[in-house]
Amino acid sequence: MEENKTCPACKHKTKERSEKERRNMLNRLNRIEGQVRGIKKMVENDVYCPDILIQVSAVNAALNSFNKVLLAEHIRTCVAEDIKEGKDETIDELVLVLQKLMK
């Protein structure tokens, strides 16, 4: 059973992730980081605006995909466990996060 722990230094919740989950998340983020560096290089090289916009759109899509995977994992683990334990405040936290994501 995974448990939400609190970081003693900053008092924020933490989540233990499997090595596979961590590696998959980091691989996605590394690809996104590479795409952003590519966009920066395009700007430095005065690439035509529509070409840059298409790459920015690809980064946005990659970030949205990352968010979907992370949100699904959060609901399956943290939220589900907290609800089973009667921690209804987690539902309020999830609603707040969803509201922020949908801005």
Image (spheres, helix red, strand yellow):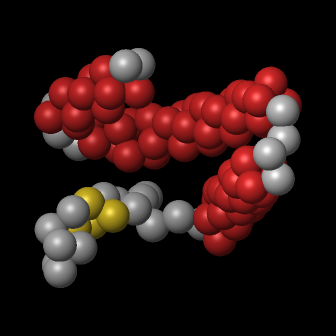
Q: Residue at x 74, y 55 (%)?
A: 44
- Whole-percent x and y of residue 74? 46, 42
Q: Is residue 15 visible?
A: yes
Q: Is residue 54 visible?
A: no
Q: Within the image, what quadrant is residue 24 found in? A: bottom right
Residue found farthest to the bottom:
9
Q: Residue at x 64, y 33 (%)?
A: 60
Labels in figure, total: 0
Residue found farthest to the front:
46
- Whole-percent x and y of residue 42? 80, 49
- Whole-percent x and y of residue 92? 19, 27
| Left or right, 56 with reference to 12 | right
48 relative to 8, above or below: above
39 relative to 25, above or below: above
Q: Relative to the observer, which residue lies in front, 85 or 35?
A: 35
38 relative to 48, above or below: below
56 relative to 12, above or below: above
Q: Relative to the observer, which residue lies in front, 82 or 67?
A: 67
Q: Residue at x 77, y 29 (%)?
A: 49
Q: Residue at x 66, y 63 (%)?
A: 26
Q: Quadrant of the C terminus?
A: top left
Q: Quadrant of the N terminus?
A: bottom left
- Whole-percent x and y of residue 54? 79, 28
